[in-house]
Image (cartoon, rainbow, N blue to C red):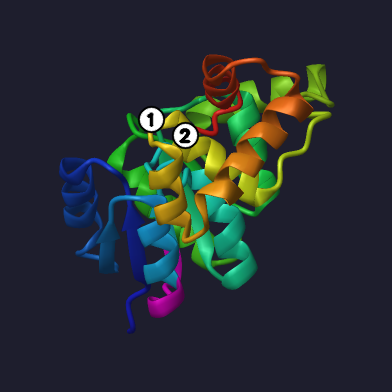
Amino acid sequence: MKRARILLADDHKLILEAIKNLLEPEFEVIETVFDGRALISRAIELNPDVIVMDISMPLLNGLDAGRQLKAALPKVKIIYLTMNQDQDIIAEAIKIGATGFLVKHCAASELRRAIRESLRGRSYVTPLVAKDMITSFLQTPLRGENPIHLTPRQREVLQLLAEGRSMKEVACVLDVTTRTVAFHKYRMMEDLKLKSNAALIQYAVRRHIV
């Protein structure tokens, strides 16, 4: 029987190697990548059945990468494996269309189960967060709404700036001009009513963009 093809994305090489060794007896791990932009590029090229990825990744975070992946590859199954148990993050992952959400200290068998469930068209959320997630949704049904909507390009610029990159470096990564980066930066500061670079970075951290 043909094994499901899995693409792994995490910025920690040791974790990637451990996950690969865990999955390979049952699934075919076709690629491992270390940042969100490499993930999108390789996923579009390889068209895996399932992507297992972290949320916190350089160049492009897992949530924004997930949005782009679901637009480019609607049938791909996305499973988040992360240390982050924030309820807003979980809600956003599900909204994007993820079929699995696990924390890194879950049992090894859970990841294999989540992949199997995803391939059958079902969802799997680790019991470590599922109960809290349901309680949170019931108590705060509008939680996570943000009156200021950043465009996908603005979010990309913001993450790269928050990672400490210069506007010239951001322009190089995104293949745009420095003037375009500056336009997005100052437009965000104006819309968000922020007065400094530090405040902009703090916003990125609070919103889990970086």
- Amino acid at pointer 2: Leu
Q: Is residue 39 visible?
A: yes
Whether residue 170 sits left or right of residue 138 in the image: it is: left
Tag of residue 164: 1
**Rendered location of residue 116, percent (x, y):** 45, 61
The residue at 52%/55% (across/down) is: 177
Is there CB contact under 8 Å for labels 1 and 2? yes
Whether residue 41 sits left or right of residue 205 in the image: it is: left
Dot 1: what SS?
A: loop
- The range drawn in magenta is 44-50
Is residue 90 covered in magenta? no
Is residue 48 covered in magenta? yes
Tag of residue 206: none
Whether residue 137 sits left or right of residue 56 in the image: it is: right
User: Are there few (<14), some (14-19), or many (20+) residues within 10 Å of tag 1?
Assistant: few
The residue at 71%/36% (across/down) is: 187
Q: Is residue 59 visible?
A: no
**Rendered location of residue 210, percent (x, y):** 47, 32
Dot 2: what SS?
A: helix
198 over 141 or under it: above or below: above
2 over 175 or under it: above or below: below
Whether residue 116 sits left or right of residue 72 in the image: it is: left
**Rendered location of residue 200, percent (x, y):** 58, 22
The residue at 38%/45% (across/down) is: 169
- Amino acid at pointer 1: Gly
60 over 149 or under it: above or below: below
Mark 2 = which residue? 161
**Rendered location of residue 2, percent (x, y):** 33, 83
Quadrant of the image occupied by residue 131: top right
The front one of 59 and 176 is 176
